Image (tube, grey):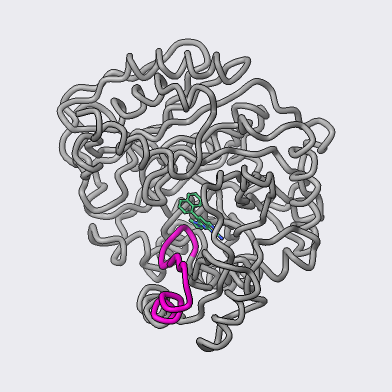
Amino acid sequence: MFSKILIANRGEIALRIIRACRELGIRTVAVYSQADRDSLPVRLADEAICIGQAASSNSYLNIPAIISAAEITDVEAIHPGYGFLAENPHFAEICESCKITFIGPTPENIRLMGDKTAARETMRKAGLPIIPGSASVIKNKEEALKTAKAIGYPVIIKAAAGGGGKGMRICHNDLTLVSSLMTAQTEAEANFGNPNVYIEKYIEEPRHIEVQIIGDRLGHILQLGERDCSIQRRHQKLLEESPSPVVGSKMRKRLGELVLKGMKSINYVSCGTIEFLLDEKTNNLYFMEMNTRIQVEHPVTEMVTGIDLIKEQIRVSAGERLKIKQEDVHIRGAAIECRINAEDPDNNFLPSPGKIEHLILPGGPNVRVDTHIYAGYEIPPYYDSLVAKLIVHGNNRQEAIKVMHRALSEFYISPIKTTIPFHLKLMENSLFLKGDISTHFVQDMFKEEAKGE
Ligand code: MV4
């Protein structure tokens, strides 16, 4: 096992990793930007090194500064958290060449899954259902038109180097397809440095279902059930839950078998998430893409499986064997996570950074709060707006919702605006209570409100 690791991240995930390390007896090094000097992970880590200015490109994305900090403090491994350098194959390679363990998948795993067309083709070969679409990258408008003719409109153009919703375009006919192709390629080049795009059939009101997996370096892989992440706004998830209210035991078993086949085919190691779209009209399930990192919503899976994913992730990176067997993984009850962002839900979710003067955190049975904030903390404006994750557990979905409602009503943050009032409304929404939601839910909820006013 490692004796000391560096955490190349900030905020709640940096703190989450420090906590896992403490329990494993591993010393920690926090790296931080000038804007995060007074942050909790900096205070709680065993050592802390400033790596640059507030802008991420000068600090949390600054590879030479991070590697220097790792060399100076003599760590054996780097945990990248999520975002920043977590899915940068080049960074994973540099760590390797400096004899520092990158706590994550191999650079090959990251690179393969980062190319969304290659990921699609690899998973198709492994037997996973993929969304009907182009076999590979679309080279010209003739190929685009041919693909659309074969699968039928509407279609969606996606960037091969994209993911997470950036640079997607929906097209309903030949005319818009041809004009969108050009702009999609230009945008892809500008955003990702790669103009490659591909085409899929557009699934109209899908549910976003994702499966958590973890693999060790000895070839063992576990699947830890699904999360339903359909409650999102502009590709930012707001609430995640496990199990999904629409996945039955038969579909769960099939999902599990599919992801294990897919992951074994690429010898995947570390934590990862396989994203699926579920078309509720046809009950068809499709592989969409894979995230080769620990995700924000990992606690939802921890709550229903009892597995500490960060500790396991560190253990497998140190070469240890997974302690749990697939037959010992059981999904117990239901868990929900609400993302508390410093944003104003009454003002188009406008970011609301600033100083937290008053803070009351919820507690009591079945409540977990993952946060780096404290009374007197000033939320810097330079990073994402996530300030806390409120995670609850119940014997079933209904009970978990009751616990969440109770915990949200205890939660008090002032004077900054947060998404707490949005989540409170959600816990009372009849469609949410029924589990009758798709990825359009939040948008529709605000449309309904506008009508009523
Ligand atoms: C789709 C889709 C419908 N059909 N692909 C959005 C995030 C990115 N990972 C892929 N996304 C989508 N891809 C096809 N063929 C709809 C979405 C989508 C979506 C997916 C998951 C969660 C929320 C979403 C919100 C809008 C669109």
Q: Is residue 178 above or below residue 383?
A: below
Residue 351 among those drawn in magenta: no
Tell me if residue 346 can be seen. Answer: yes
Q: Is residue 185 above or below residue 223?
A: below
Location of residue 265 by image quarter: bottom right
Give the residue at x 70% y 27%. 331
Identify which residue, 449 or 101, lies in the foreground.
449
Location of residue 101 by image quarter: bottom right
- Residue 367, position as x, y percentages in the image: 48, 18
Q: Is residue 98 above or below residue 395?
A: below
382 left or right of 186 in image? left
- Residue 362, position as x, y percentages in the image: 37, 17
Give the residue at x 18% y 25%. 414
Where's the C terminus, which quadrant? top left
Give the residue at x 41% y 51%. 235
> Count of labels shown?
0
Give the magenta range: 163-181
Give the residue at x 41% y 21%. 427
344 left or right of 239 in image? left
